[in-house]
């Protein structure tokens, strides 16, 4: 398989994962599919020409689907990897990647029942997202942060 085919599959699987994320009522089988699609997308991005930003965003997506599937350990693992990649490769990131990583950690800690850490990362997310110049990007992450109850 060529790198371009891997990239195409990575994008296709990422988009398919979002379709399942946005589905209101998923069955257990659909949760499994959502998890597999997210991980498969991450794998294919690793095989394609990629940047640390692609890897970080893949971990962000994996964290989100683990939260939705009620798997806080997986969510925390991927959120931590996302933040490590964002912090370790700041020159490759968009300005919304850091608040996005904080959002993933806030959501994962909330799912794990650690409200103190969830609040800490939510606060960091709000602080850093306020610096995002693009209004659409900023509002999207602000809405994600606000959805963490």
Image (cartoon, grey):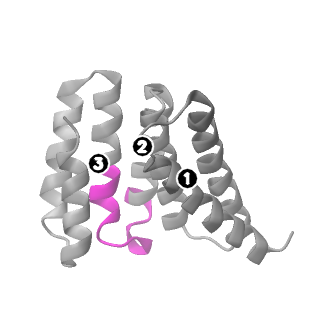
Judging by the rendered image, the residue that carries numbered circle 3 is 103
Disc 3/disc 2 C-alpha distance (Å): 9 Å
How far from the left and from the top, in percent, is residue 10? 65, 63
Q: Quadrant of residue 14?
A: bottom right
Q: Identify the image quadrant of the N terminus.
A: bottom right
Mark 1 neighbour class, 10 Å CA radius: few under 14, some 14 to 19, many 20 or more: many
Q: Please tell me whether the stretch drawn in magenta is mainly helix, strand or loop.
A: helix
How far from the left and from the top, in percent, is residue 129? 19, 62
* Magenta span includes 51: no
Residues shaded magenta:
87-102
Label 3 element class: helix
How far from the left and from the top, in percent, is residue 121? 22, 42
Judging by the rendered image, the residue that carries numbered circle 2 is 79
| Residues at marks 1 and 2 touching, judged by CB atoms closer than 8 Å | no
Marking on residue 17 = 1
Does residue 91 sit above or below 66 in this rendering?
A: below
């Amino acid at each position: 398989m060529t790198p371009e085919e891997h990239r195409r599959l990575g994008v296709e699987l990422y988009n398919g994962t979002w379709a399942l994320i946005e589905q209101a009522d998923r069955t257990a089988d659909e949760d499994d599919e959502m998890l597999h699609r997210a991980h498969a997308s991450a794998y294919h991005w690793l095989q394609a020409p990629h940047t640390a930003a692609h890897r970080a965003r893949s971990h962000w997506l994996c964290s989100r689907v683990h939260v939705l599937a009620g798997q806080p350990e997986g969510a925390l693992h991927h959120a931590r990897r996302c933040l490590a990649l964002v912090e370790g490769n700041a020159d490759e990131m968009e300005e919304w990647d850091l608040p996005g990583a904080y959002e993933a950690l806030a959501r994962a800690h909330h799912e794990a029942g650690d409200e103190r850490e969830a609040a800490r990362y939510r606060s960091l997310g709000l602080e850093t997202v306020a610096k995002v110049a693009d209004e659409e990007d900023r509002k999207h992450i602000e809405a994600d942060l606000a959805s963490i109850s």
